[in-house]
Image (tube, grey):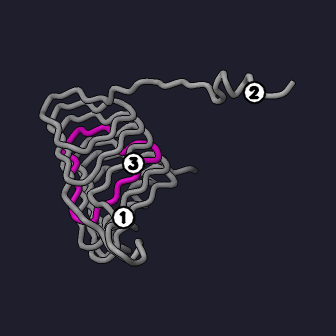
Amino acid sequence: MRLPSVMIGMIRMALLSLFSCGRIAFRLPVRLDPNVSLSVRSGGRIRLGRHTSLNRGARVSAVDNALLTVGGYSLIGYNNVIVAREQITLGNHVMLGANVCIYDHDHVFRQPGVMRDLGYTTAPVTIGDNVWIGAGVMILKGVTIGSGSVIAAGTLVNQDIPENSLVYNRRELVIKPRITEREQNEIPG
């Protein structure tokens, strides 16, 4: 007899909570697909609300005493990466499309030394209730996205977004010849 995937997810969550010494907390039910990673290090904490779903390949991490909170009825999409070093808060009924990245930190790099050892600058990320984040969106540190907003696929979010906004990057497709006409005429033959 096979256990339903919901039951397997609940067992996985209970084991995660137990082995993380309470640094991963959740309110049942929570759906956890296979190949999902929840990671807490150096005092980090993760809180998941009721009916939260994490799809296959999602990587959720809280480190350096950070708090990462996901509200109820929210969906973490396929292959999402969410890394908190200070604080990331997702409200209730938040939907993240595939391949979304959310970071509340940047690497320090404008100092001499080995870059990986220079540390981070951090600022909280807050996403309100009932927000839809399209596939491939990247949300950077210090951003607040107001409730009821929609962020279109492929958008880079690096500033605050008011409530009930539709946000997209306007991009132009640039097509140029790989070889100029003059260069083409210089090719022997």
- Residue linked to disc 1: 14
Residue under the point 56% across and 50% down: 2
Indicate the amino acid at tag 3: Leu
State how far apart marks 2 and 1 are (Cα): 69 Å
Q: Which mark is residue 93?
A: none
| Kind of residue at disc 2 | Glu
Where residue 10 sits: x, y (%)?
A: 38, 56
Q: CA distance from mark 2 to mark 3?
A: 57 Å
Q: Quadrant of residue 47?
A: bottom left
| Residue type at numbered disc 1 | Ala
Q: Nearer the viewer, mark 3 or mark 1?
A: 3
- CB-based contact (under 8 Å), mark 2 and mark 1: no
| Residue under numbered circle 3 | 54
Residue sitting nearer the eye, 27 or 179: 179
Q: Quadrant of the C terminus?
A: top right
In the image, 143 versus 26, the foreground residue is 143
Residue closest to the far left: 163
Which stretch is magenta?
76-95
Q: Is residue 70 left or right of residue 164?
A: right
**Mark 2 or mark 3: which comes first in sequence?**
3
- Is 153 contained in the magenta span? no
The residue carrying mark 2 is: 186
Q: Residue at the spot x=12%, y=35% of the render?
A: 162
Could you classify mark 1 by the number of other residues whose Cα lies within 10 Å: few (under 14), some (14-19), or many (20 or more)?
some
Relative image position of residue 84 (x, y in whole percent): 29, 61
